[in-house]
Image: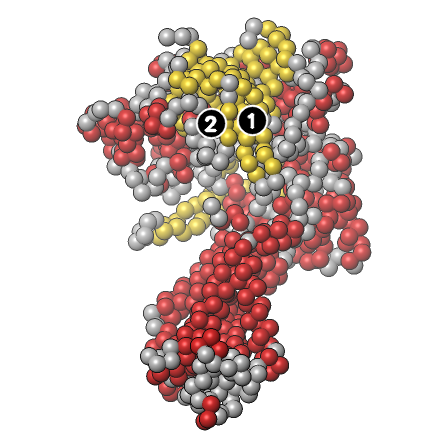
Amino acid sequence: MTDTFLDVKGLTIDIPVGGGTLHAVRGIDFELKRGEVLCIVGESGSGKSLTSLALMGLLGRRIKVRAERMDFDGTALLDASPRQMRSLRGARMSMIFQEPMTSLNPAYTIGDQLMEAMLLHRDVSRAEARARAVDLLEKVGITAAASRLGQYPHQLSGGLRQRVMIAMALMCGPELIIADEPTTALDVTIQAQILRLLVDLVREMGMAMILITHDLGVVARVADKVAVMYAGELVETGLAADVFRAPMHPYTRGLLRCIPQPGKSRRGEPLGTIRGIVPSLVGEVSGCVFRTRCDEAVAACRGTIPQHWPGDGHAFRCVHASGARIAEQEGA
Amino acid sequence: MANTTVDPLLEEIIGPTPGQLLRKRVFGHQGLMIGAVVLVLITLVALFAPQLAPHDPYAQSLVARMKPPVFLGGTWEHPLGTDHLGRDYLSRLIYGARVSLMIGAIAAAISGVIGTAMGVAAGYFGGRVDAVVTFLINVRLAMPVVLVALAVVAILGGSLTVVIMVLGFLLWDRFAVVMRASTRQVREREYVAAARAIGASTPRLLLTEIMPNILNNLIVVVTLEMAHAILLEAALSFLGLGVQPPTPSWGLMVSEGKNMMLFEPWLVLIPGAVLFVMVLAINLMGDGLRDVTAPENRN
Amino acid sequence: MLDAAKTPPALELRNITKTYTVKQGLIGKRRPLTAVRDVSLKLEKGEVLGLVGESGCGKSTLAKILLGLEPPTSGEVLVDGQALGVQDRLALARRIQPIFQDPYSSLNPRKSIADIVSLPLRIHGIGDAASQQKAVRDMLDVVGLPPRVMNTFPSQMSGGQRQRVAIARALIMKPEIVICDEPTSALDVSVQSQILNLLGDLRAEFGLTYLFISHNLAVVEHLATRVAVMYLGRIVEDVSSDDLFDASAHPYTQALLQSVLTPEPGLGVPDTQLGMAYPNPIDPPSGCGFHPRCRHATNLCSAQAPRPVPHRDGHVECHLHDPETAMFGTD
């Protein structure tokens, strides 16, 4: 068994739209080891959710997914038959969505929904599946778990529903969990609890997790590794500690300046901004996609953008190796 | 200055205007275009009936009875033949389009006004108003349209006016149901709250904030109810309780032809086919309008 | 309390209660739901009052009452010392304007930007068409939008641009008070900061008073001068922003502050020890509404509701801080 069990290289997602092709994701690389949490962070339109759906093989036939390599524990996901993908999904890799109300079927009890995947993928009796469901509901912090099995989704609060979703994702003991904005719809107090729970479970069960979010605070607190996406490209990756302590790409630095930080940013003082909007990704996309919004853009940004490695596992794509950043620090 | 926070010129305005998008979708929708073209043709025929009709639709000629259409060996004097009273069938069809369109349009307009008023009031005010309107809708839905129409026509006597009024006062239910639901949905939008917080009056809210946003649904129901009314008129006329002879109505023509149906099937088939094409065109247009005005509801 | 003789607060709530009747299930009986429970609050001129709390705490109901969109069940709202009922709706609209959360739903999709922004002027019959056009152009400039957007429609704009339009509409009548209901929570991070900066600049430029409703304490802390924390229809703590982080008294405020995830790696996710469920407002807990989730709760907390006691320059509602009950102690 190799150390790296999810290995993605050159993942590209094209969506045909009226009048051209939307190059939603363009050649991104990342890898994941067991027990690791990778956070993919980006704003709307960055392609972070598409990336997760591509991994799960959940994108429609119309959407074209290509990659040099997309291996899950030795299985090439892109070459897998629909049947193979189905046996992976829900069993060895599972997904948690943002909106727990729409992801749970209102017509079935949560017990039925919890047991469904397990009865489908594993050779177990209903009683065994039921015992596992109760066990997991308790594990995700739901009291009176046995009696909850007979309840319907609408009888639960948002936080409880998201816990049920997590329990459901864990039923078959997956090795990889993909969580797409799992706490965005929840209150801050519940968010902290759910995130703690997820991280603890990942550590305890030796799973790997990809957490997709737009919230840099969540990333900093949860991630081992960070991948910053902008308009379909991975602009910076690295260990969370490196990326947050020494962000290199102008976009990462810009994002961090945008958020108010109690105790750090001074009250009433203007926050940093990133001017402009995400460019259209329909048609030919070349050079650095961030150049239209970047304060440090130069003519070279239209050409090929080199990758730099400022530290072990820390990488970013920019024409400025580090000069721009140093200039900025001196200015500050 | 506030506007130093961002250089506005860097924020491009994205996308075409809603009008451009709508035009693109309308002309790109085959069903809608086919339906609209057919309907426009029928309307033109109805408008210019006196110019287009080769004969007087009422002129009887006992020597030229039951002449076959040209494709069954008839002459170009009567391209679609003549009926049992020797009246030119093509001319009667052309004038019949007037009757059908008039009944469809006026009945849909009357029921549209009634149903929309009730539905919007119920959806916007809720509470008791809603309870009353919902009750009225249920009462109306419990009445079989054809039977009630038959009864009223039987009492008041059949005439174009009576048929139009009866249909107009019977077909408002779908307007009320759809408008009530749409209004409830739009009422919750924050732009309505914003307009209220600005101090807009209730009539203004209804007219400028809510109506424009439920208009697309209204148009769809109008087309569907128009087709509905036209078919009901044909049915009533067929039963002899709708438009009275000698007025040329397609339903009446089917009815008059049914006695000779076994020997001269074209007497029934021709008006039946025209009726079918017209209702199909209206429905195609209604479906198309629903698609192009609310693209987010598709897929 | 005694300084009421000075200039009256820009906005004052006195003992506001709002009760709805809700029906449970298909044939369930109607039961009262008290969304806002006897709330009193003052908003001084030029202040930014942050109102924070979890969903269902009543903060949006409070905003609706302030905007005149819902009448309170009891209590009164005073603007510049005058009771709201006395003023007519149009006069109120000139002084209090809202900015809503979702810029996709707060702009009428069938109207052009010029129509949307000029609507208040037209309703109040201010100026002729030409002067209204000019006012719209000026206001769009203030919020950072070029004049060419006037003839475009909301669907052609990005979320940030739409929120600027909503701000222009709110400010065109030069109101004194702006109720911002989660104005940035639907926006991307980079756009959020633009809008927050804009709101800050506008406040300075026009001398505005904000009621800033948000669940994001980091955003509130950045903008607000004072913060009111709401829980189950009550303001449980009312504290100046300077005191918020080092001198907040209520255990709930402290838990909220703990839940703020700042982008500092290595700190991990905090344990708020809040338990999980926000109580159902139809069946509020006895005594202090927060006691089932409070790690300091005692028997007293479930038996008796705490009363507001002065704390720093505001107040707090917690037995721990009430000199008369604190003796029963925490542990």
**Between residues C103 and C221, which one lies in front from this camera angle?**
C103
Q: How did the renderer colour the structure? A: secondary structure
- Circles 1 and 2: CB distance less than 8 Å? yes
Residue B28 lies, in percent from the top left, at 58, 52
- Give the amino acid at mark 2: Ala
Label 2: few (<14), some (14–19) or many (≥20) C-alpha neighbours in 10 Å? many
Q: Secondary structure at mark 2?
A: helix
C317 with respect to B255 (left or right): right
Identify the image quadrant of residue A204: top left
Query: Which residue matches tag 2?
Result: A54
- Percent position (x, y) of residue A15? 54, 34
Residue A248 can be seen in this image: no
* Residue that numbered label 1 is attached to: A25
Of the residues shown, which amino acid type is indicated by label 1?
Val
Tell me the distance, in whole angstroms, between the alpha carbons under discs 1 and 2. 10 Å
Residue A175 appears anywhere in the view = yes
Q: Residue at x 79, y 59 (%)?
A: C128
Which SS class for mark 1? strand
* Quarter that holds the N terminus of chain B: top right
Q: Residue at x 41, y 46 (%)?
A: C33
Q: Residue at x 57, y 72 (%)?
A: B43
| Mark linked to residue B51 | none
Find residue B174 and report its horizontal and vertical position in percent. 44, 65
Mark 1 or 2 closer to N-term?
A: 1
Q: Chain of mark 2?
A: A
Query: Looking at the picture, does residue A103 appear above or below residue A317?
Result: below
Relative depth, front residue between A227 and C68: A227
